Image (spheres, grey):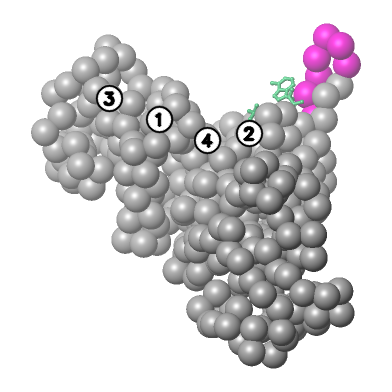
Amino acid sequence: MIELRHLHKQYKTKKGTVIGVHDVNLTIARGTIFGIVGYSGAGKSSVLRCINLLERPTSGEVIVDGVNLTSLAGEGLRLARQKIGIIFQHFHLISSKTVFENVAFALKAAGKSASDFAPRVHELLQLVGLSDKADHYPAQLSGGQKQRVGIARALANDPQVLLCDEATSALDPMTTQSILSLLREINQKLGITIVLITHEMDVVKELCHQVAIMNNGRIIEEGAVYDIFADPQQPLTKEFVQNTLEFKLPRKMWDKRDPNGRIVKVLFRNEAAEQAVIYEMLKHVPVKTNILHGKIDYIGDKPLGTFIMEITGDSAQLEQALQFLRDQQCGVEVVTDAG
Ligand SMILES: Nc1ncnc2c1ncn2[C@@H]1O[C@H](COP(=O)(O)OP(=O)(O)OP(=O)(O)O)[C@@H](O)[C@H]1O
């Protein structure tokens, strides 16, 4: 388990003091894949780097599996850090060393004897799917392959925690998917807790169990990924979620709307996403519906349906229809512009 208690990080610059992290409190359960999301400058990297004390917090505590890292220094801190692997957006491989040597480097740095290297390195390369690239140099690898080397290196010393600093931001969508799959496999197979920072809600949707949204050095909202997508509370969280789920109604469709109708965006959450809610509504309320757009996202393995439909009827019937949907725990938003 990772606990951040009243974490505060400030930087001294020529222009004065900059606050990177402000009183962040987080508990990350063992084995979780935890995402931290925010725009540039929100403080994500600062939090991540405080977890392994790459940055020492100005105040507050970082506790990993019961060990208060902030109270450690020297050899004690070095040993504790070995249990926290990290991968980076731009991989940070040593260009003059082969894939094998890059991974072996982490073992050497941890004081392992050279005779232990080879089997362990080959085991790691097999895990990340690079057994045939041991003698290649980083320049001979694709971005995805470089990140796989980064992952093998980060796992070399059997960490309990893997930190991912925008690990897929430099990769194309297909390669991103394959790296996310590998991270999921590592989490499931090895039980490693993964903390990742990203500005892409798609990555969170695809991989994470829990998520925290950061703004101006603070966590403004956190929770299970499904709940955050299904019912975001803060305006910034809504913005992040909408960027992923949003469908913009084409102007032409908006212009053709029925004057006696309402265009409504309905979010079908949990059980509602699997039931015939619209059919039931039409049985209860004499309105007409015309579906303009619909899709179901799977978050984890739970469905979240987003539908845009035109509901037509008199104003009492419309109210009744919307209330029926709300009673089914659907999110209901009357669309007032094509956007
Ligand atoms: N070494 C540093 N020196 C001075 N200020 C810093 C330093 N590192 C971060 N900051 C400042 O702290 C704040 C948070 O930065 P941080 O890099 O943690 O945010 P971020 O959300 O990770 O952004 P990005 O996605 O752009 O990396 C910003 O205002 C940034 O300018």
Q: Is residue 80 visible?
A: no
Nearer to the camera, 220 or 149: 220
Q: Which residue is mark 4?
A: 165
Q: Nearer the viewer, residue 36 or 172?
A: 172
Q: Residue furthest bottom?
A: 284
Label 3: which secondary element: loop
Give the mark, 1 or 2, whose residue is nearer the N terminus.
Answer: 2
Which residue carries the number 1 mark? Answer: 171
Disc 2 is placed on an element classified as helix
Task: Tell me the CA gap for discs 3 and 4.
Answer: 19 Å
Tell me whether circle 4 and circle 1 mark residues in contact (CB < 8 Å). no
Would residue 104 be visible to someone looking at this image?
yes
**Which disc number belongs to residue 45?**
2
Magenta-highlighted stretch: main secondary structure? strand
**Which range is magenta?**
9-16
Amino acid carrying mark 1 in the image: Leu
- Would you call the spot at circle 1 few (<14 residues within 10 Å), some (14-19), or many (20 or more)? some
- Give the residue type at disc 4: Asp
CA distance separating discs 2 and 3:
25 Å
Say left or right for 102 vs 154.
left
Query: Which quarter of the figure has residue 289?
Result: bottom right
Residue at 53% x, 82% y: name it.
275
Mark with earlier residue (3, 1): 3
